[in-house]
Image (cartoon, rainbow, N blue to C red):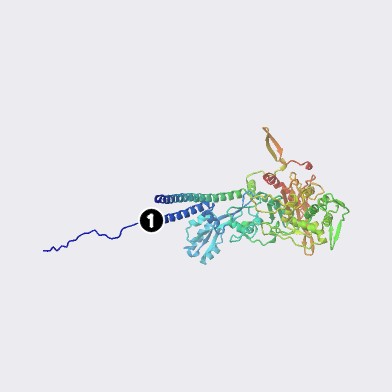
């Protein structure tokens, strides 16, 4: 019998296949590792680059960026010592959404308790209109806490940035105003609008708040004495053009944010364009000396008491002025005819060029936009004559300060500025010949410290004040009026090595019956203003200002120059 | 060779993560410090504003008339003296020396 189970025989199967290493050049194993290595290398290079990039980043951080980019942000403005003139602070405005008020009567009673001085009949009307309205701007912390404790959902606080002016009126014309959207509309706020929105650090000015205050106080005091329409003072460093003080009165409180339409509030220092009178005689003499056409002891003989030029007559103010005068005496005694003779020696081109050179003839490029433009005129023989003693030619007090600074500082070009520079420019460009300054400074000193001079009231002991007065009648339609004058005193001190130029301009001053003058070059005093001239008005103001600010300038500003 | 490459990769990953970690820590510290400085700066500027306001000439004169009986007086520059030490002796000299032509 055959077995049912089949027999299975296992035999070793042999075929021709046998595993062998690939004979191709492609090494898969190695390339895979190399590929991974390459990926990691790339990643680590990217990491390293990122690390290096992070390391090389400047100190900028997110917080600062968000702070600077905050809406309505503007950088602070400080004076030369770092005292705040303008500060951006965050404040809270309170608004009310009438739609969310639960009990209007209760809310009104509560608000009355916190803000008793508000007009609640108006607020009641607003509440009934169901439209969101601003209830209180720039709320104090105390009132903010009180109003939020009411727990009314309709009360909506909103944090805003606002500009504070701790010095109030003191720098109104320099700083200028901003609109409701925090955009500058005048002064530094306007001319540095973009910069103030970008920079983080405060903008440092050249002005000094203490000196500005003292000068403004004197101007206010003498405004009452001489009842002038307005006045201005500029105090500038003659060597670098830094303006230490610039006051224009009347001024306004920047915190009130009023719209100023009254022309009497213009910045007289920069925007006011005036005929300044005899202060221009200094320029005529300086031009003559610069051209080498005259010397200080050059004599002018047989000078007439009056000159006719076209329709106008040129007269001497001082009836007792001698007929023979040296150049020095012409300036000290403020001779009109003598100045005309010097100008005639110079001729139009040379005098015009000199005035252009010292920057009194054309519009000045300044740090604020409120700058007046001197009225242009046609030069002629008569114009040359009147320009020589400051009539028929206009300029701004700022340009006058610049002109006197150049003449006093040795003849070097300067640019008046309100912005404190961090780097000191060492290169000085000479525009007036060497030696002219020294000669003019000596004459200016004699105008103050001699009896013949017209500025004796500014002879304050210890300061070596020198300067020139200018009394100009105001131009009206068809001529000049004797009733309205512009009295100016352009001074420099100390004359042995000038550091400062001080311009005092009184717009339409009146004589005072009660003011008591103390003589400086002789003993005694005098009650009442005998003449409405610069010598009896602006010079007195300048003297009082120098007396007050002098000790500060002499001690605190030792580092200057 | 394989081991070297692998260890390099491992070392690179390790170093990168360590550097990244320490950088993050430093970044956090810097951020915190900057935030603290920023708040201190704001506080300082507010205090400075208050100080500037309270020590402004206008306020000082107001306080002087409010709390003191004597008036403020102008300093005569001719009376200002300079103190200096010379050979162990204290020397007083005029701050403003009168020029010969001014005497």
Nearer the observer, A381 or A401: A381
The residue drawn where x is 44% and y is 49% is: B15
- Name the outermost residue toward the bottom: A129
- Residue A88 percent location from the top left of the image: 58, 55
In the image, farthest residue toward the left: A1
Question: For residue A115, what is the image quadrant?
Answer: bottom right
* Residue A508 visible within the image: no
Mark 1 residue crowding within 10 angstroms, few (<14) / some (14–19) / many (20+): few
Q: Is residue A175 left or right of residue A544?
A: left
Q: Quadrant of the N terminus of chain A?
A: bottom left
Towards the viewer: A369 or B26: B26
Q: Nearer the viewer, residue A43 or A164?
A: A43
Q: Is residue A28 above or below residue A125?
A: above
What number of labels is visible?
1
Residue B86 shows in the view: yes
Quick one: which residue is furthest to the top in this view?
B88
Side (left or right) of A444 relative to A264: right
Check disc 1 and report its element: helix, strand or loop: helix
Quadrant assignment, res A257: bottom right
Q: Residue A62 location in percent, x, y?
A: 51, 55
Residue at the front extreme, as displayed: A16
Whole-percent x, y for residue A143 in the image: 53, 55
- The residue singled out by tag 1 in the image is A29
Q: Nearer the viewer, residue A522 or A285?
A: A285
Left or right: A164 with respect to A341? left
Tag 1 subunit? A
């Amino acid at each position: 019998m055959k077995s049912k189970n089949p027999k299975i025989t296992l035999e070793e199967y042999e075929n021709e296949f046998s595993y062998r290493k690939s004979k191709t050049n492609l090494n898969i194993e190695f390339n895979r590792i190399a590929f991974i290595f390459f990926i990691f290398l790339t990643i680590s290079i990217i990491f390293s680059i990122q690390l290096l990039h992070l390391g090389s980043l400047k100190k900028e951080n997110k917080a600062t960026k968000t702070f600077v980019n905050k809406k309505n942000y503007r950088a602070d403005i400080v004076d030369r010592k770092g005292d705040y003139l303008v500060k951006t602070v965050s404040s809270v405005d309170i608004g009310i959404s009438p739609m969310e008020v639960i009990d209007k009567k209760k809310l009104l009673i509560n608000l009355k308790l916190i803000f008793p001085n508000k007009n609640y009949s108006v607020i009641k009307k607003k509440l009934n209109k169901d439209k969101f309205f601003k209830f209180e701007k720039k709320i104090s912390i105390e009132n903010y806490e009180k109003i939020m404790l009411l727990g009314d959902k309709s009360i909506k606080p909103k944090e805003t940035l606002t500009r504070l002016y701790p010095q109030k009126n003191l720098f109104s014309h320099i700083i200028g105003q901003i609109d409701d959207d925090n955009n500058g509309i005048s002064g530094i706020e306007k001319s540095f609008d973009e910069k103030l929105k970008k920079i983080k650090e405060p903008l440092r000015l050249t002005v000094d708040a203490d000196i500005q205050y003292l000068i403004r106080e004197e101007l206010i005091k003498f405004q009452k004495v001489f009842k002038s329409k307005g006045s201005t003072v500029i105090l500038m460093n003659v060597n670098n053009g830094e303006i230490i003080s610039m006051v224009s009165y009347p001024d306004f409180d920047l915190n009130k944010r009023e719209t100023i339409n009254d022309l009497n509030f213009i910045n007289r220092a920069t925007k006011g364009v005036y005929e300044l009178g005899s202060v221009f005689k200094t320029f005529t003499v300086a031009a003559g000396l610069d051209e080498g056409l005259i010397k200080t002891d050059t004599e002018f003989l047989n000078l007439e008491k009056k000159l006719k030029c076209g329709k106008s007559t040129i007269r001497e103010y001082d009836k007792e002025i001698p007929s023979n005068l040296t150049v020095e005496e012409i300036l000290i005694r403020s001779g009109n005819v003598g100045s005309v003779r010097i100008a005639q020696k110079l001729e139009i081109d040379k005098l015009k060029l000199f005035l252009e050179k010292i920057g009194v003839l054309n519009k000045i490029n300044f740090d604020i936009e409120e700058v007046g433009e001197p009225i242009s005129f046609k030069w002629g023989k008569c114009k040359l004559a009147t320009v020589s003693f400051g009539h028929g030619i206009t300029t701004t007090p700022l340009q006058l300060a610049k002109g006197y600074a150049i003449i006093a500082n040795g003849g070097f070009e300067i640019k008046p500025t309100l912005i404190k520079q961090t780097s000191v420019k060492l290169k000085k460009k000479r525009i007036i010949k060497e030696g002219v300054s020294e000669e003019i400074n000596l004459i200016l000193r004699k105008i103050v410290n001699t009896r013949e001079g017209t500025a004796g009231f500014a002879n304050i002991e210890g300061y070596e004040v020198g300067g020139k007065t200018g009394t100009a009648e105001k131009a009206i339609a068809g001529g000049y009026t004797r009733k309205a004058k512009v009295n100016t005193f352009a001074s420099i001190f100390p004359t042995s090595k000038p550091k400062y130029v001080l311009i005092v301009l009184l717009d339409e001053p009146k004589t005072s019956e009660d003011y008591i003058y103390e003589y400086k070059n002789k003993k005694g005093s005098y009650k009442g203003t005998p003449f409405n001239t610069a010598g009896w008005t602006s010079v007195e103001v300048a003297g009082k200002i120098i007396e007050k600010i002098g000790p500060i300038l002499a001690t605190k500003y030792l580092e200057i120059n | 060779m394989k081991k070297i490459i692998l260890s390099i990769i491992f070392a690179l990953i390790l170093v990168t993560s360590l550097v990244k970690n320490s950088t993050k820590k430093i970044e956090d510290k810097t951020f915190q410090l900057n935030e603290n400085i920023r708040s201190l700066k704001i506080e300082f500027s507010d205090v400075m504003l208050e100080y500037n306001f309270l020590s402004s000439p206008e306020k000082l004169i107001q306080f002087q008339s409010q709390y003191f009986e004597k008036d403020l007086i102008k300093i005569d520059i001719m009376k200002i003296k300079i103190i200096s030490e010379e050979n162990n002796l204290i020397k007083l000299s005029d701050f403003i020396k009168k020029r010969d032509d001014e005497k």
